[in-house]
Image (tube, coloured by chain):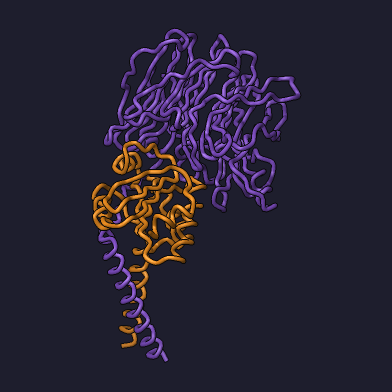
Amino acid sequence: MFTLIYRTSLFIVLFSTLLTVNKSVAAEHNHKTMAAKIEQTEKCEGIEITCAKTVTLSFAPNGDLWRLWAQNTSMYFQISSDNGVNYSEGKRVDIDQEKISARNENRPKIAFDKYKGVYLSWASPKEKKYTADVRFSYSSDYGKAFSKPITVNNDNLLTGHSFNEMLVTDEGDISIVWLDSRLAYQLRLQGKKTNGSALYIGKANYRKGEIRFTNEQLANNTCVCCRIAMDYNKQGDLAILWRHIYGDNIREFALLTLVQGENVQQAPYQISYDHWKINGCPHQGGAISINENNRYHMVWFNQGDAGKGIFYASSNDQGKSLTKPISVGVQSAQAAHPHMNTNGNNIDIVWTQFTGTEHQLWHQRSKNNGKSFSDAALLATASEGSDRPFIIKKDNISYVSWQRPKQGHLVQAL
Amino acid sequence: MKYVKVSSFSILICFCFCINFSYANSIAFDKEQLASVKTQNMGKQWLMLLWSVDCPPCFKELAIIQKLQNQYDDLAVVIINTDADDEINEEREDIIEKFKLGGFTNFHFADGKGDQNRFIIDPNWYGELPRSYFIENNGKFHGKSGLVNQSILVEWLTP
């Protein structure tokens, strides 16, 4: 009996092998490259910052600098008391392991209140492709322990909720915005065509016992794969900048200020007019920073018929009117991924460029509220990849954060 | 004798499995690979499609290619994943398998080499996806960002 099975199996195996070889030969005939190596890059072992694809940086009210990254279904943090020169031992955020989106435009977020509260928010992919939940955890004791994570989106649907951004006030008022596909999900069930996601906001305050996030839709037809940006204005209102879909897949930036106490939400203002028509993923969000004079400063990236590259503009009426956009960086040198911050009348913009072999971090400063800018300066380079750069501020000094995977995380005063 | 048969049977099964497993993998992309596929496809119109696991519209274009391969023989299509992240290797292979695209030449950008590879293909492309290159029979590239209509793909690939 075994001999029969053996002979039959031998025949099947030999036949299968011949078939495979034939397939390989056919494939090689079509593309000889099949014989080429299947390159496996060296895996990054151990828990360390150089293994991180993305890093999120934030100053706590006491001046400590926290950096947060995700690795192997966990988040880790380190604290620096000297503005990023030295860090404490890496510590795992002690919550159950789960998938964490930490690549390109998606990454965990960290914020603080003035009572030693630490707030974390991230997107956790679910079992089905392009589905995720926005998750949240809170520490009341400066990171010694974190609460059991909760899901911020309240629709209980297996659909997209990601690209979360978070701001927390000194008093612990939490605002999380994200891109949400619940409406698209429901419309698809009805057999209707959809385009894009929706912009949602969730609010809570753990210190006041408000531990369930509200869920409110702010806009529909947003781009599905670009990060959101937000800042508080002088009145304490939230201003949100995102990439919207106008008309027939024209991807432009839109701005909305959520005025407190107003029941009727104002319509978002269109910020960019570069006419980038693309039924796809730009993977490039913008940045906003509002200074002490309540002027909104913004940067963005587009590849439209009417405007290509990085642009900066500002508004003193919450986006209703805008200064003429200024081109930033060298378009032909792959200038992309801009971020910015304001510091009084100083406007700092950083972005990346690429030479073909080397990633570069560039910086430009305006000392007159954006009227003119100094010449661009090269700050640093990277050889093994480049994360998006970000600017954060402490005591009127701006710092740039640039993660360089496999090379190191740069923090530098501007 | 029985022991020898059992052992050789196990080895053959493993051998067969390994051959098929390696066939399913895509190939790390570099400038030599690009030069090679350009040479091989010289003299005909072909398509190079670039996609990412983080790009929902890319899946629509992969689905179109899947549909077309059932309708037409020998489509000249080269597929390149741009994620440049070892963490998504399994996911990438699952997607290639799901759309039954393993019969095409599949490349991927190696971990951390996303920008380098993008630059090799087109220094004027900023990474937006899906990205399709329509390559003429004389080797001239025409890049287009965003989802491409099925009719355009059919027209290009079945002249």
Q: Is residue A135 visible?
A: no
Q: How many marks?
A: 0
Q: Residue furthest right?
A: A263
Q: Residue at x 36, y 68 (%)?
A: B20
Q: Residue at x 60, y 40 (%)?
A: A197
Q: Residue at x 55, y 13 (%)?
A: A295
**The chain shown in orange is which?**
B
Q: Can you give x and y, in whole percent of width and height, for residue A267 in the image? A: 66, 26
- Where the N terminus of chain B falls, by quadrant? bottom left
Examine the image and state in which quarter residue A219 appears.
top right
Is A11 placed above or below A71 here? below
Task: Name the colour assigned to chain A in the rendering.
Answer: purple
Residue A21 vs residue A245, the one in the foreground = A245
Is A234 placed above or below B140 here? above
Q: Can you give x and y, in whole percent of width and height, for residue A34 in the image? A: 28, 61
Position of A83 with respect to A101 (left or right) is: left
Examine the image and state in which quarter residue A262 appears.
top right
Q: Can you give x and y, in whole percent of width and height, for residue A76 in the image? A: 47, 36
Q: Residue furthest front?
A: B159
Position of A392 with respect to A241 (left or right) is: left
Position of B31 with respect to A325 (left or right) is: left
Q: Is residue A137 visible?
A: yes
Q: Residue at x 56, y 9 (%)?
A: A293
- Where the C terminus of chain B falls, by quadrant? bottom left
Residue A11 vs residue A35, the one in the foreground = A35
Q: Can you give x and y, in whole percent of width and height, for residue A349 in the image? A: 42, 20
Residue A259 vs residue A98, the one in the foreground = A259
